Image (tube, coloured by chain):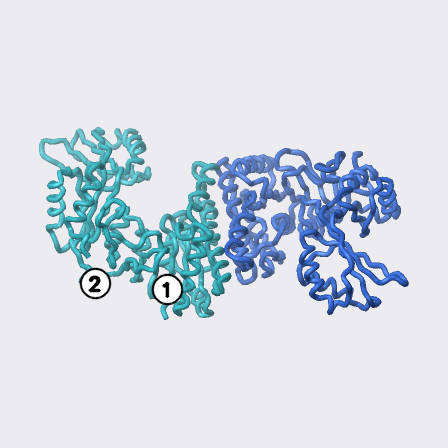
Chain colours: A blue, B cyan
Amino acid sequence: MSKIVMKFGGTSVATTEKIAKIAHRISREKEKGHDIVVVVSAMGKTTDDLANLAFELSEAPNKREMDMLLSTGEQATMALLSIKLQAIGVDSVSLTGWQVGLQTDAVHRNAKVVKIDATKILNLLAEKKIVIVAGFQGVSDSGEITTLGRGGSDTTAVAIAASIAADICDIYTDVEGVFTSDPRFVTNARKLAQLEYDEMLELANLGAGVLHPRAVEFAKNYKIPLRVRSSYNDEEGTILKEEVDMENNLVVRGVAFESDIVRLTIEYEVPFNGSLASIFTTLAANHINVDIIVQSIVDGVKPAVSFSIKKESLAEAITVLESNKQMLGFTFADFEVGLAKVSIVGSGMVSNPGVAAQMFDRLRKENIPVKMVSTSEIKVSVVVPQNDMIQAANALHDEFGLALV
Amino acid sequence: MSKIVMKFGGTSVATTEKIAKIAHRISREKEKGHDIVVVVSAMGKTTDDLANLAFELSEAPNKREMDMLLSTGEQATMALLSIKLQAIGVDSVSLTGWQVGLQTDAVHRNAKVVKIDATKILNLLAEKKIVIVAGFQGVSDSGEITTLGRGGSDTTAVAIAASIAADICDIYTDVEGVFTSDPRFVTNARKLAQLEYDEMLELANLGAGVLHPRAVEFAKNYKIPLRVRSSYNDEEGTILKEEVDMENNLVVRGVAFESDIVRLTIEYEVPFNGSLASIFTTLAANHINVDIIVQSIVDGVKPAVSFSIKKESLAEAITVLESNKQMLGFTFADFEVGLAKVSIVGSGMVSNPGVAAQMFDRLRKENIPVKMVSTSEIKVSVVVPQNDMIQAANALHDEFGLALV
């Protein structure tokens, strides 16, 4: 008998039919004798629909009230799921964020979990009830409803798993697990049986979806085994843990990619004078996310810095930079659109210095020009022309033997 | 400067456009210098939609979970209204039932208000904020979310008005006030400027809609002046109070009617032996609402009792009666469908014994047969053929001079 947390995302609870299916799935797990806590998201596009109503009323809706509004989505799902479980004879009880004692800080729309008082959950589990918890929401010190921001329900699931010392936290979703790459674009992509937390973190940050980075980080910190699996079948999915078993230990474990990248280049008329930091501080203050930054100072050449941003931030980035030109002391040089980022991820890279070289070599053979490079201990990202993105991803997937089990 | 409670029903907040309109209306009241608490219902048909989802999952959804589900409707409305108020520069804050400290008993789906701790509301009013409270919901001693049942938002408004000693509780709705009769069917029906709580109670119980009887009773007990008025214009509406002013003091103040009534008649083979109570206990245990009951025992005639129920309960009533025939000791005699109930209401009746006679006389002149009669101190109800209902209502409206101001 284990303590398990089962988390179901919005797609998995989008209709009453789907909620009914999930109820039966939970019932089957219960029959195995497990103690079960379920965490649910809002049904389908409910959160977006509610947010749209708010934006019809205000360009910048008050964040406290947005939390009040959005937190209703998960509350409705958990009640419906509990109604179905009881209809099929499974004893259950649903709890909101404040009822479950999920304490957060007071940062509305992006609150951080401070602590969870597990007493209530543990008492209900002892009564052999299934406990259903609303994902994404908590309560602040002063009794205000808060929400955890994007991917918040994953974070709720992991935080609750940590608080009750669960044996595993299962994240049920509409994919079968974490793949070596996106199977819609990379022909030979296959599901990974295991993956390390840090690798998942890199993949998640690189846009490989599936799991929110905050949830992965939480699981890593509390050493909660996290499993990503399908809501629609009983396949094992992908288990995230601290260190994967030897047989799974490939050097590169995943290829991620992201389109619609823009590179901006800034030149300095005078030698570099410390304004580099100011540029990025200014961009950050305007909520423009900068990804890769490359700087090179060559004698006789004007100092310059290149950095990448998402396409949708371009107009605002240019406005911000132009209006702060004087203060920042640069001449705006150039931007290039139509770019994409392709990354390889794997914790084995740390001890394999040749990985980046092998990557560049393969891209050269494929005649794909590399515009920018960024490396970390467990990943290498390159910026390439967007038209070459899929070819690059497939080539690298092949190059590092990811299609082989 | 007054303390006022403004309550808006589901129709008044059905869309974001309507919420925006209401925000402007509240803002205008605020500019007059009032302290304002707003109570809102769920948007349009939200409550029904949520309930339908639950019934897709279960024939008899768990009541605790239904409260969890349905209470999200009001929470969403109040957040949206607060977002709009802040967008137009009016400081506001929304509060759920548990946040506002609206304590109820633990009877899910039909909870009664136990007490309200007004401290939080009064503090927020002192900060010159508009306080928006979710109608229809509260919290039990053990921290469970409860709902107050049909008309619950009206009850919330009145209860809050009582707790903060408000000067008036305004119920905004899609009609302009309480009418002498339903203007859709009674040509000369007109809006009443004033009405007594008890009269409103009778009218509400007779299906004249507008206000829920519980809310009226609450207002009566706490002597809160209650005003029913339109969300769409600035007309004065109808004020409910303990005693109306002399000039408004008509003997009969309203004509109510209700279609789809069925009369059942039961005969006893043996003289009445106490099973009368058993019949109605049995019906009540099966949630069949019995309205008018008429019994007559005439020498030489078999004892019989007639009672009226709603058409939709007929099939179940017959099943219940047939299956308990032996135990109840009767022979089922007869039922008559296609009936309607027409009632006259007015507190002046108590001191005017001729009112019922005048009513019967007029109906006789109109050739409308009276099938059943029921009287109370301030109303007389008759059951007539459904085809004659509108004619009867118009005739009585005319007979008691209700068209004259």
Which quarter of the figure is the N terminus of chain B placed in? Answer: bottom left
**Residue for point 53% across, 48% down:** A49
Q: Nearer the viewer, residue A131 or A320?
A: A320
Residue type at numbered disc 2 = Asp
Q: Which residue is mark 2?
A: B245
Which quarter of the figure is the C terminus of chain B placed in? Answer: bottom left
Q: Are marks 1 and 2 in contact (CB under 8 Å)?
A: no
B323 relative to B342, above or below: above
Q: Is residue B119 left or right of residue A241?
A: left
Q: Give the distance between the C-alpha atoms of the residues marked 1 and 2, in whole angstroms.
A: 22 Å
> Which one is earlier in the sequence, the residue at label 1 or at label 2?
1
Chain letter belonging to callout 2: B
Relative image position of residue B123 (x, y in whole percent):
45, 68
Residue type at numbered disc 1 = Ile
Relative image position of residue A180 (x, y in whole percent):
75, 39
Relative image position of residue A388 (x, y in whole percent):
78, 42
At numbered mark 2, what does the secondary structure look like: helix, strand or loop? loop
Q: Is residue A329 left or right of residue A15?
A: right
Q: Are marks 1 and 2 on the same chain?
A: yes
**Residue for point 81% across, 64% down:** A268
Chain letter belonging to callout 1: B
Q: Which residue is mark 1?
A: B4
Q: Is residue A220 shown to the viewer in this render? A: yes
Relative image position of residue B85 (x, y in whole percent):
47, 61
Q: Nearer the viewer, residue A262 or B291?
A: A262
